Structure formats: structure tokens, C-alpha cells
Image (cartoon, rainbow, N blue to C red):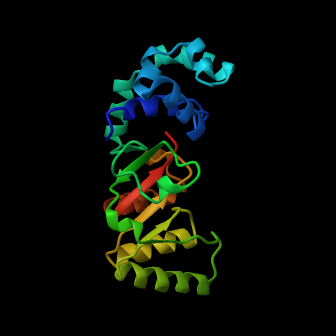
């Protein structure tokens, strides 16, 4: 974990409003995210390019955020942080137009995960869809590809389970927080735990 990870997390707590472009502005103006968090006030945040209403909100709420407690909560949930400054940040993800500056992870990413296959599909799957997904995902996982999906009902679930059953790696990229109570759908909380043991569960959400 990068030494500035707690400060990336702190800015990421503001209603999902500090995304890649605003992180880029903060780094460009302050030099480090730690300095941006510890030394900024509303005026300097505006000077960095942050909108006035968000700058005021950050300045007002910052004294109320206990970063030590925040990191303890993440540790309790076995959640780590990956920032764009980390050496093990996914190489291919870094090449997209606006890569996320912070991601939360349960589990572990490995170099071999770059050789992976994204599986997406309907939540209301047919029998054929179930069989085809199970067969293709299972065979490819057994051949060494990492199966990547979204942990949703339907095709996603079948793909993850096929990879796990064939002792392969699988990654779930989700649109929610990844603490146990926030995993959606709730029926896949146990699956999320299995995925984190054979790959990783990832999210941009705090």
C-alpha cells in the first residue's frame, strides 16, 4: 500500500465527487495527496481547480474525519487500497483515458491476471447461457486465464463459480462498496469471499 493511500481514501469519501480529474488537479497543485489533505484550506482547493462548493465541503468536514479510524475499519473488513502511484497498479488499467486513482481490494492481484477474460451477460440467463458460460469460463480458467466479471446474478455468478470450481483465478469488479454488508446482491456475499481467496474483489467506492 502506498504511503499516501489514507489520504486518497480521505478525498474519496466525498460523495464520489473527487474522481480522476480532480485527483489529477490536486496532485498537480499540491505535489502530493498528503499535502493536499493536511495543508489545504477552501481557498487553496479552489486555486487547485476544485469547485467552490466542494472545496467548502472538504474544508468543513476534514476535521471530522479520523483517518486512523478509517484505516482500522478497512483493515477489519480485510480491505486494502491500491492507488495509481502503487507499483502493482494494473498495467493495462493505467493505459485507459481516466484510470481510477484509488481502488479498494479484498484479495490480491497478480501479474498473470493481465492474461484474463472479461465475462458479461444477462442476469436472467437461459439454460443454454448457463451451460455455455460454465463450459467456456471453466475451460479457460483451467487453461490459466483469469476470469473477470461483476458478481451480479446470472452470467456473472456462473462465470465466477466456473473459475473457482476449476481452481482458477477470478476477479470481481463491482459497483458498490466491498465491505461485507455492502456486497450486492446479498446472496453473493459468500461468493465474494471465495473470489477474494482465489483472486480479488475490486471497487472504486469507499
* Residue 70: quadrant of the picture: top left
Q: Residue at image x 38%, y 66%?
A: 113
Q: Is residue 53 above or below residue 2?
A: above
* Residue 90: quadrant of the picture: bottom left
133 to the left or right of 146: right
| Residue 43 picture location, percent across and down | 60, 12
Q: Nearer the viewer, residue 27 or 38?
A: 27
| Residue 78 picture location, percent across and down | 33, 45
Q: Is residue 88 above or below residue 83?
A: below
Q: Nearer the viewer, residue 57 or 163?
A: 57
Q: Residue at image x 46%, y 48%?
A: 178
Q: Residue at image x 51%, y 30%?
A: 28
Q: Nearer the viewer, residue 145 or 50?
A: 50
Q: Quadrant of the N terminus?
A: top left
| Residue 40 picture location, percent across and down | 50, 16
Q: Is residue 106 above or below residue 72?
A: below
| Residue 75 picture location, percent across and down | 32, 39
Q: Residue at image x 62%, y 16%?
A: 56
Q: Is residue 60 among what the camera can see?
A: no
Q: Is residue 92 among what the camera can see?
A: yes
196 to the left or right of 184: left
* Number of residue marks: 0
Q: Nearer the viewer, residue 68 or 116?
A: 116
Amino acid at each position: 500500500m502506498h504511503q499516501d493511500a489514507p489520504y486518497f481514501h480521505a478525498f474519496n469519501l466525498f460523495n464520489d465527487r473527487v474522481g480522476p480529474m480532480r485527483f489529477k488537479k490536486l496532485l498537480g497543485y499540491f505535489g502530493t495527496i498528503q499535502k493536499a489533505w493536511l495543508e489545504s484550506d477552501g481557498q487553496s482547493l479552489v486555486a487547485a481547480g476544485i469547485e467552490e462548493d466542494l472545496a467548502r465541503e472538504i474544508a468543513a468536514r476534514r476535521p471530522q474525519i479520523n483517518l486512523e479510524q478509517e484505516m482500522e475499519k478497512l483493515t477489519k473488513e480485510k480491505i486494502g487500497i491500491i492507488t495509481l502511484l502503487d507499483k502493482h497498479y494494473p498495467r493495462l488499467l493505467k493505459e485507459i483515458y481516466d484510470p481510477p486513482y484509488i481502488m479498494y481490494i479484498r484479495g490480491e492481484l497478480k501479474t498473470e491476471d493481465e492474461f484474463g477474460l472479461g465475462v458479461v451477460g444477462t442476469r436472467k440467463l437461459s439454460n443454454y447461457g448457463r451451460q455455455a458460460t460454465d463450459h467456456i469460463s471453466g475451460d479457460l480458467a483451467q487453461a490459466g486465464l483469469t476470469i473477470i466479471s461483476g458478481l451480479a446474478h446470472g452470467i456473472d455468478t456462473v462465470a465466477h463459480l466456473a473459475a473457482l470450481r476449476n481452481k482458477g483465478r477470478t476477479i470481481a469488479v463491482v459497483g458498490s462498496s466491498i465491505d461485507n454488508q455492502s456486497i450486492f446482491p446479498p446472496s453473493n456475499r459468500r461468493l465474494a469471499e471465495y473470489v477474494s481467496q482465489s483472486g480479488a474483489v475490486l471497487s472504486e467506492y469507499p
